[in-house]
Amino acid sequence: MEDLNEIKRESFQAICSDGVVLKGILMIPEKAKAVVQFNGGTAAKKEFYLPFLEFLATEGFICCLWDYRGSGDSAPDNLKNCNFTFSDYGLKDMPTIKDYLNSRFPQFPYLIFGHSVGGQQIGFMDNLSNVKGMVNFAVSTGYQPNMPFSYRLLFFYFFYIFTPLSILLTGYLSAKQFGIMEDLPKNVVLEWRNWCSKKDYFFDPAFYGKSVPEGNFKKFDFPIHTFWATDDTISNEKNTKSYWKHVESKKPITFYEINPSELGEKEVGHFGFFKKRLKEKLWGKALAKLEEFI
């Protein structure tokens, strides 16, 4: 259903404990019933997700869309001298957004929607006490050997040729000018690359409990529902299982397999869930889960 609510859109900013300013967009329905913190994918242009969140807002969900530190509107003027890390997303940025939303809308149930890294790093957050539930799409490890051969070649080129050359020439990952993704600080993309080199991602003993904390990944106290697409080159079945075997919750953790052919679609992939053409086929299923969790 559409146009149930008049939606007010406003820009906002939230300040992290280390002084970093995060910027984003709020979509506030006239008749609201819950808050959704939407955590997007790595270096994804946040406006890509706007149609999906506008859909949720018309159904009464206050939606928060924002950029991680060092990316999009939250990027500093000079990325070359930026020392942000990938794990800062979950350790510093996600908790800051949640604190901001809790203080702004304390009267509403709290939900999280994560895409890719936006769901991966939830366990690093230290302020999850009032979360009613989380819905995800394409949340998995990013282990290269589990990907199709053609994508492994692209993966290798991006991380081991394009990335080091870009850092050498500019001091950061300069990807936006090539239409690949948003630019990223060098330490963000290098930590991301290191995690992707291990089957268990940041849960690998080389990182877990060392360069990243153990967090709350085995101490969740809310239900989690994850959509994944069978044609996703990154979050395929193997990588999805590799990630979620490390996660535990006192409430159910469930999965929904999206097969493009069963939907009459040629592809869904790693981003297709949020495209307007799948509104009638998938968005309602996500909405139903959010409704269930509140």
Image (cartoon, rainbow, N blue to C red):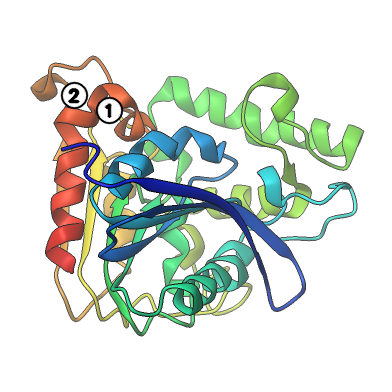
The residue pinned by badge 1 equals 231
| Vertical side of 238 occupied by 135: above or below | below
In depth, the one of 149 and 50 nearer the eye is 50
* Label 1 crowd (10 A; few <14 / some 14-19 / many >=20): some
Identify the amino acid type marked 2: Pro
Residue 68 seen in the current view: no
Earlier sequence position, callout 2 versus callout 1 = 1
The residue pinned by badge 2 equals 260
In depth, the one of 258 and 10 nearer the eye is 10
Which mark, by number, is residue 130? Answer: none
In depth, the one of 223 and 60 nearer the eye is 60
Quadrant of the image containing the N terminus: top left
Q: Does residue 174 appear to the left or right of 129 in the view shown? A: right
**Residue at 55% of width from left, 45% of height from top?**
42
In depth, the one of 274 and 137 nearer the eye is 274
Would you identify the image quadrant in which residue 138 lies? top left
Give the structural element (helix, strand or loop) at label 1.
loop
The number of numbered badges drawn on the structure is 2
The residues bearing labels 2 and 1 have C-alpha atoms spaced at a distance of 7 Å
Q: Does residue 131 appear to the left or right of 75 in the view shown? A: left
Circles 2 and 1, Cβ within 8 Å, touching? The answer is yes
